[in-house]
Amino acid sequence: MNNKGESELKNLRKRSYQDFAEEIIGVEARIMLHDGRPLIGRIVEAKRHWMKLSVGNSVYYVNKAFIVYIQPIEGRKQ
């Protein structure tokens, strides 16, 4: 593949993995896991496959594949 084709392929791969993580960093949210357990805490960081959540004095690293939904709690962005 030529340089132009490789560059286009890299751009396509990069775009295909974008999500809304930048919108929810620092937000207090309710995260519903696949097994029905909710986690309520502040979203500290979000990577491609993992999310770091601060709940009280604990930190949880949650695989995004196990998240059913994320519900931001209004007025709690830090």
Image (spheres, helix red, strand yellow):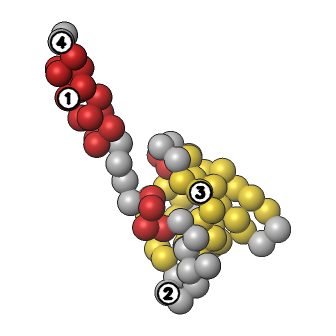
- Where does residue 24 sit, x and y in percent of width and height? 48, 68
Secondary structure under badge 3?
strand
Mark sitting on residue 74: 2
Q: Nearer the viewer, mark 2 or mark 4?
A: 4
User: Few, some or many C-alpha atoms within 10 Å of disc 3 (few <14, some 14-19, many ≥20)?
Assistant: some
**74 versus 11 height, above or below:** below
Rendered residue at 24%/35% (across/down): 12
**30 versus 44 height, above or below:** below
Q: Earlier in the sequence, mark 1 or mark 2?
A: 1
Q: Which residue is mark 1?
A: 8
Can residue 29 be seen in the rendering of this structure? yes
Secondary structure under badge 4?
loop
Q: Earlier in the sequence, mark 2 or mark 4?
A: 4
The quarter of the picture where the C terminus appears is bottom right
Distance from disc 1 to disc 2, alpha carbons, whole Å, reads 39 Å
Q: Earlier in the sequence, mark 2 or mark 3?
A: 3
Q: Which residue is mark 4?
A: 2
Tags 3 and 4 touching, CB below 8 Å: no
